[in-house]
Amino acid sequence: MDLSSRQTRVPGEYLVTLAAGADVKAIADLYGRYGIKGTQDLGRNLFLVRLTEDPGPAKLEELRGQNAQIKAVQPNFVYRGNGRGNIR
């Protein structure tokens, strides 16, 4: 079982990494057709993008391959602790 099948993702939320020197406008150009509710700059060319319509990770990855300005895209996974205390 791979990691993605064991994790829960936040529907409509994706982490998008831009290539060095790319403009944030590239996100709207590529994914705007799905209705962007918000784009939050997390630093180091990483953005949290919230979409109105969620086409799914496979479709966003397919589109990413068509635009050199987008380095990576992945779902915003929900991580849960294992209940064993703090991670150190």
Image (cartoon, rainbow, N blue to C red):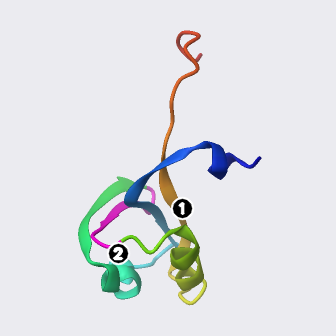
Kindly identify which residue carries mark 1. Answer: 74
Q: Is residue 61 magenta?
A: no
Which of the labelled discs sits on residue 24, or is there none? 2
Magenta residues span: 44-53
Question: Looking at the picture, does residue 43 appear above or below residue 22?
Answer: above
Q: Is residue 56 left or right of residue 39?
A: right
In the rendering, at what x and y percent does residue 41 appear? 32, 58
In the rendering, at what x and y percent does residue 45 appear? 44, 63
Label 2 sits on a secondary structure element that is: loop
Assign the magenta stretch its main secondary structure: strand
Q: Mark 1 or mark 2, which is nearer the start of the sequence? A: 2
In the rendering, at what x and y percent does residue 18 appear? 48, 71
The residue positioned 50% from the left and 81% from the top of the image is 69
Q: Is residue 48 magenta?
A: yes
Amino acid at dot 2: Val
Q: Is residue 60 left or right of residue 36?
A: right
Q: Residues within 10 Å of mark 2 (few under 14, many from 20)?
A: some
Question: Looking at the picture, does residue 72 appear above or below residue 48?
Answer: below
Name the quarter where the C terminus is drawn.
top right
Amino acid at dot 1: Gln
